Amino acid sequence: MNLLPTLTEPRHFVLWERALFAALAGASAYGFWRRFGPILGRILQSKKDPDFRLFPITKRVRDFVWEVLLEAKVIRERPLAGVAHALVFWAFCVFALVTLNHCAAILGLGFLDPAGRVGRIYFAVAALFAIACAVAIACLFVRRFFVQPQWLGRLSWESGLIALLIFMLMATYLAAFFVAAPAGAVRALWWAHTLALLAFLPLIPHTKHLHLVLSPFSVFLSRGGFAQIPPLRGDEDFGLVAGKDLTRLVSLQAYSCVECGRCMEHCPANATGKQLNPKEIVLGLRGYLDEFGPASEEPLLGKYASQQAAFECTTCGACEFQCPVGIEHVPILVGLRRGAVNTGAWDDAYGAKLFLALEKGSNALGLSTTERDKFVEKNALSIFDGTQEYCLWLGCMGAYDPHGREIVLALVRIMRHLGTSFGVLRKEKCSGDPVRRLGNDFLFQQLAEANLDAMVQNRVKKIVSICPHCVRTIQEDWKEFGTPPEVEHHSEFLAKFASQLPSFQSQQKIVFHDPCYLGRYRNAYNEPRQVAALAGELVEAPRSRERSFCCGAGGGLAFLGEERGERVSHVRAAELAATGAEVIAAACPFCNTMFRDALAARGGGAPELMDIAQIAARRLPERNAG
Amino acid sequence: MKIVVAIKQVPNRDAPVRIAAGGKWIDESDLEWAMNEPDAHALEEALQLKEQHGGEVIVVSAGPERVAATIREALAKGADRGLHIVSDDLGARDALGVARLLAAVIKPENPDLVLTGLQSEDLGLGQTGVILAELLGLPHATLILHVEKTDAGLKVKRELEEGWFQSIDMSLPALLTMQSGGNKLRYATLMGIKRAKSKEMRAVSAAELGIELAPVVTLEQISAPKKQKSTQILSGSAKEAAAALVEKLKTEARVL
């Protein structure tokens, strides 16, 4: 016990010291509240989230423990900086008691005796954390001011000051173990620690360090579902049009942003020279709230966010997946689009063409439904009548796009080989994915309702589809208007029957590209790999699984024509080709079509592009053909 | 400017058209319905004129109950009022009969401008608008792509054959039949749909208007066109064949 070092505190405080402390503490608290009070006010004055449910609470608690207390997400996505950050955070947690005791001591209310058993052990443990924290904050300082990762944005003097204060807090705490006399020095150390503490407090709400206070709440209270688009409520809700449409969750998230730039680092639009920067979108909302407040009629798309940027999002969700403080970027970006489209403010020739095609017709490609009928007839696809096990959902790409059709036919061959009964709907409308992500709620509701009707009429219980966008939209987004049937992506279907499919040992190297809507949106990473591995040896792209880089087609962007800057699909195709794989395996007809164009633009020597269904069907006996 | 737009609801282009028993009309049981495309352009022109110069846009359509959906669509896109002439026997009326119905409700409105599509996508008679002008006693111009309001009245751009256009100055009131493609159509919005709920839509029956059903032209029979496929092999070098193909696409297929 006596081996533990002892912390030395001043024994007595004189009256003027107590008065000075009270005055400084009051000033510090005032400095904190003067900024934090209005922020809290703006969050609480925002519109209530109509769909918010606290329960089931288990997932919230789990996320809170994993992401906040254990810092697992911060560490996993940026290990070095993440561990350094975690050490600072954990030290803060341990210091909560130390700091409380420190301030109580001057009022004669100290509850941890440095000489006592409990106090000794606690202070010693805190000292270990203090050492770790001091080293960590020094490293983070070097990273911030010397390494200067571009994602962190402009240098700010506040960051330096905060780092310095944290370092001072730790140093003055540790020094108190070594300075036992004279009393003047002990007293000076105590005051130095106190002053650092009182200077730190008002800085919190004035800087990105506000996340210390808000991020535990933003993580705990987030909607929970990945990229979940909230329902609109009432006759005057058209999405995020003006400040009055910002909900409490959105405002809380806007103020929680820690400006780490992970969202920006992983954003395909940002990486290819477009205007969109998800971090600036969130900080833009914060700027808007500071200037106009949450009741304003001032349009959100204007001074603080551009319409162009909002419509450059592929809804790949990399930003939201990466965010360590629970900000849900996709509902925010889709919300801004909803505001623009639902009020008619978005004027885009391609967008209008897509919308008009779906107002009148059945598919996003704007083709005649007779084209689908011919395809169904020519390939003798039976019509679903309620007796078959699966309803094979063709989707716009599967029914009308030549390459999408090939994927469907490959799946059909496999299903016939396996003896699985299936049928296609006589009539099928677009699932509504592109209009949902582009923010056209009128069209989305029409399509979802018409399709849900068809599901009931045809007694559909289970759907299988080659399109992750349809799968997601049917399973999650249709819920707003009814109860969708169970949906499987073909990778999940094929993985179930992988043992019954012909595999062949091959030296062929295959790289699998994770589609955003299958990976991040649906957590299906292993199933498609299991299928692709039937035909060769899998290699991984530098960015794969959760970190997969979008093909550029999502969010309705496949229909919006030429993009500004570099093409997302070209960047990704180059990355996949650079793995040296002979085959690029895709599992989404949109990724497929994007890469087909991108690889064609690369010219000769490009790897072969195949859907996993085509890979699995390649070695099927010929008699099953057609 | 007070503008009336006459709109027809037609079977969706994709709809499987089958001839009904009796051979005098199509089987409507499996059809989806949409706004006639040239009428959609007429509506768009009216909305743009209103946005530039103020005024009111009134939509008129004749047909059975289902036509109300198309009128609501027009209201959702920005029209101010709807007039529905409820009539279940539109198929038995000729262009004059339909024009008389339309004229009966349009005349009391005293509009400055009446717009119609140049023809319907289903029957394609191209007469209703012109007859309507006669019944209303208004000057008219057909095949209009673009309308500009001037101090004296209107300046309109009219499409002629082979890429020629005619520019005409007209006085108001007038009637124009609009060609497709002259303007960019707007998409329907959630806000428009919600606002349309509170807009006035008046229904009158054909009987109330007192228009006698005495067709000048009677429909005897309808039949599907015979399908014909012919293949032509274009000879010569690739360059010559390509030139010949472009010529054929321009003059015969008229897709270029």
Image: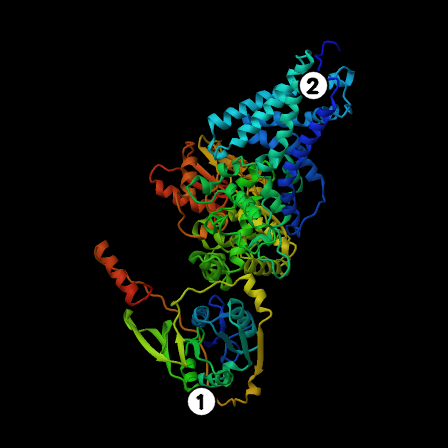
Q: For residue B216, which numbered disc appears in the image?
A: 1
Q: Is residue A233 left or right of residue B253?
A: right
Answer with the quarter of the image where residue A61 lies: top right
Q: Is residue B53 visible?
A: yes
Q: For residue A125, which numbered disc appears in the image?
A: 2
Q: Is residue A394 visible?
A: no
Q: Residues within 10 Å of mark 1 (few under 14, many from 20)?
A: few
The percent coordinates of residue B176 (x first, y second) are: 40, 77
The percent coordinates of residue B23 (x first, y second) are: 49, 79
Question: Going 56% across and 74% down the picture, which residue do you hit?
Answer: B68
Q: Residues within 10 Å of mark 2 (few under 14, many from 20)?
A: some
Quadrant where the N terminus of chain B sits is bottom left
Q: What SS does tag 1 mark?
A: loop
Chain of the residue where label 1 is placed in the rendered structure:
B
Labels 1 and 2 in the same subunit: no
Chain of the residue where label 2 is placed in the rendered structure:
A
Q: Pick the residue in front: A456 or A349.
A: A349
The percent coordinates of residue A117 (x first, y second) are: 78, 16
> Which residue type carries mark 2?
Val
The percent coordinates of residue A618 (x first, y second) are: 47, 41
View extreme (front): residue:
A16
Question: Going 54% across and 65% down the picture, which residue do you hit?
Answer: B192
Q: What SS does tag 2 mark?
A: helix
Q: Pick the residue in front: A408 or A47.
A: A47
Real-space Cα separation, disc 1 to disc 2, in angstroms:
103 Å
Answer with the quarter of the image where residue B115 lies: bottom left
Answer with the quarter of the image where residue A569 lies: top left
> Which residue type carries mark 1?
Val
